[in-house]
Amino acid sequence: PSHDLWEERDGIHLQTLAVVYGALVETSFLAQTFGDFTRAKRYSLVAAEISSAARDAFPLTDRGWLPRMRRVNYDLGTLEEISEEDKVLDAGGAAALFQFACPPNAEPLFPAEAVKKTMEAVKLHLWVRGGVGGVARYQMDPYCADSRCEYGRDIPGNPWIICTLWLAEWYIFTAECEADLSRAVQIINWVVRNAALPSGVLAEQLHPTTGKPLGVSPLAWSHSTFVSTIQRYQLKRRILKET
């Protein structure tokens, strides 16, 4: 158990599982490359154990996506039943499924269909349709919320730049031809036009209806994610051009 990506909740988190699984798979591959087959096998076996346990503990919910977390009963050493709070759609957990848990040299942590459904839910349920656009961290996110705004289906929370760019990264990840990359370009352009200040500074998040920068500004995480997204786009575009 640990705290989640947003430093708000304690438990076993979808995002943490994805990162740990991906790290173990890549470390196993690295150990094998350097001839350390004992460690390579050990890391691979632990990754397989995590994958098996994760698929059992994190099934698709009745809402159509993977739960963001499981809570732990520390007295009994068991998992609590999946609550409605655990089922809340979280952009961080969803994005980690393809960013870290779909390594090229191993089986993905979760079935491809579960990953696809969860990311499709992000676009459907976390996009701020009733405001400036962009992707919220999770449903009914209270952080920096404006009491004058009506949060709900159309405004699930304030749009975060990193979360919005993760959706672009998903479109890049799944693109099968150059035309598929257009969806990612649209989101990148949205960030440039709606989130960046004239100086180029990117804040943490935006007000959902006015677009005013909120939170830390500049936020290094926003800037590094923007750079990473552009790099992923350029690499994928080059690969698709050559195939």
Image: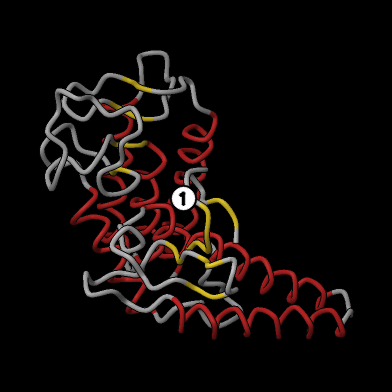
Above-or-below relation of 124 to 132: below
Work out which quarter of the rendered image holds the C terminus and state it.
bottom left
**What is the basis of the colouring in this image?**
secondary structure
Along the viewing direction, whichever of 72 and 35 lies nearer the viewer = 72
Q: What element carries label 1?
A: helix
Q: In which quarter of the image is residue 181?
A: bottom left
Q: Quadrant of residue 215?
A: top left
Above-or-below relation of 200 to 10: above
Question: Mark 1 highlights which residue?
Answer: 234
**How many numbered marks, from 0 up?**
1
Q: Residue at x 52, y 43 (%)?
A: 7
Q: Which residue lies furthest to the top in this view?
A: 199
Image coordinates for residue 201, horizontal then vertical, percent: 44, 20
Along the viewing direction, whichever of 68 and 79 lies nearer the viewer = 79
Residue flagged by tag 1: what amino acid is it? Answer: Gln
Q: Residue at x 75, y 76 (%)?
A: 28
Left or right placement of residue 104 versus residue 23 in this view: left
Q: Residue at x 35, y 33 (%)?
A: 143
Image coordinates for residue 68, horizontal then vertical, percent: 40, 61
Q: Residue at x 54, y 29 (%)?
A: 220
Along the viewing direction, whichever of 159 and 60 lies nearer the viewer = 60
Image coordinates for residue 90, horizontal then vertical, percent: 36, 54
Left or right placement of residue 216 versus residue 42 in this view: left
Image coordinates for residue 162, horizontal then vertical, percent: 42, 41
Query: For mark 1, does the 10 Å Cα neighbourhood hold few (<14), some (14 to 19), or many (20 or more) residues?
Result: few
Q: Which residue lies furthest to the front in this view?
A: 75
Work out which quarter of the rendered image holds the N terminus and state it.
bottom right
Q: Quadrant of residue 97?
A: bottom left
